[in-house]
Image (cartoon, rainbow, N blue to C red):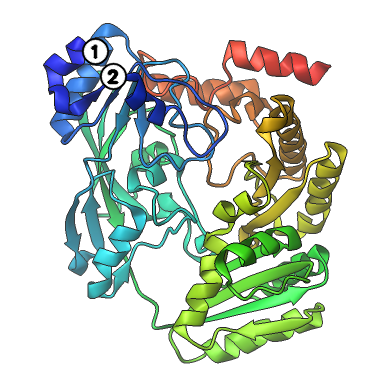
Amino acid sequence: MRGLVDLLGPSKVLGARADLVVYEYDGAVDTATPDAVVLPESTADVSALARFCHEHAVPIVPRGAGTGLSGGAIPVEGGVVVSFARMARIIEIDAANLRAVVQPGVINLHLSTAAAPYGLHFVPDPSSQKACTLGGNVAENSGGPHTLAYGVTTNHVTGLEIVLSDGEVVRLGGKAVEDEGYDLVGTFVGSEGTLGLVTEITVRLVPLPEDKRTLMAAFETMDAASETVSAIIAAGIVPGAIEMMDQLATEAVEAAVHAGYPLDAGAILLVEVDGPRDGLDDLRQRIESICREHGARSIRIAATTLERERLWAGRKGAFAAMGRLSPDYYVQDGVIPRTRLPEILRVVREAGERHHLRIANVFHAGDGNLHPLILFDLRDGPEELERAKAAGLEILTACVEAGGSLTGEHGIGMEKNCYMPLQFAAQDLAAMRRVKDAFDPAGLMNPGKVFPTPSRCREFALAAAR
């Protein structure tokens, strides 16, 4: 502590127990206490901190807004948590080149708000858009409802300034799109803070669409809604977003947000198309027809901007609304081929029944990115969390076996690192480790994340064997 204070000054270092407890957790279920928290105000601060930690072999754990859902910001091996809350400046809006340069602590929504007067926005829009930071989005390669048509964070980042674990400051990419050589920017985006610390981000801005059409379709069953999703894509239509919620999720959301969702529907789809105004109504009518052909019992078209925003407020407030159903939840985000949705959603339901847990489903149906919210009550004992994790593992295993993956946007972190062998062979993990070692040979950057760790994963293997 004293060394950090001497290095950066007392205003940038936290060490009291009452301060540290705030940084023990993120949006996932695991906790761990840091030895200290540092709040840098510049790249120079971050570089000096990294050099200090490198000299003293101290782990460094980057943290954005703490909204992550895989334990990525948890200091599982102690060390220093680096909060980027004070590095939250939009450095430049370069409208002519469709670029923005920002510090990592900038809130996702704030960037789009700042770009709006230029007729531009930043496309990736996670449900935590009002709170999550661009640095966190880069770390997790975040997506959001509009991933289907526009891609995830890596598709919208063209340059990074990073600080390596020894304090060296490096620039990767810039405002231009670089197609030659190794894609080091792409390597870094989604690396979950295990390769270095992001101190500046250059992102692509996209013109705001001329207009949008948003509709909500209610179905009797999740199967019918799932089949509709595949039918829309098969018809050659790629909406900006296709989101799905089951009845349990809808009940919670409607009680919290009053979005106008029908409470008696087995599933609802929220579909949005955007672009040039001419042709949007025809596109919306085609989607409406497909929904009716697949058994939609009712369809509601957002007639005004306010109605559209209310429908989306329900979807984006879904995770927070789960508190009306249960004091705790455990969420996974496995990805599957769209055509396997009915089958895997049945696996989700059966996992809940087998472990005597309710599971609410709210997810990005268009790209098969599931978000089963496994509800439990930790007040009933620690075994409740273990049952939730067991159900989550069954679901993720089914996702991988269906040709999918462990995560779509929440990351691996410390929550799924023991599950990596479900998807990757030993030689695959060894190749990833060589990339990690090239950036961080000392192994100080966010240790205990992404890769299976001997102690925790041995326990997992023993439990699975039983």
Circle 1 or circle 2, nearest the eye: 2
Asked whether the beta carbons under mark 1 and mark 2 sit within 8 Å of each other, the answer is yes
Q: Position of residue 287 (x, y in %)?
A: 66, 81
Residue 234 coordinates in the image, percent (x, y): 70, 71
Q: Quadrant of the N terminus?
A: top left
Mark earlier in primary sequence (1, 2)? 1
SS at badge 1: loop
Amino acid type for the residue under numbered disc 2: Gly
On residue 1, the disc is 1
306 or 342: nearer the viewer: 306
Residue highlighted by disc 2: 15
Q: Where is 8 relative to 322, above or below? A: above
| Amino acid marked by disc 1 | Met
Is residue 417 visible in the rendered image? The answer is: yes
**Structural distance between the alpha carbons of marks 1 and 2:** 7 Å
Give the residue drawn at x 30%, y 59%: 110
Res 180 seen here:
no
**Residue 344 horizontal side relative to residue 47, left or right:** right
Is residue 356 toward the left or the right of residue 115 in the image? right
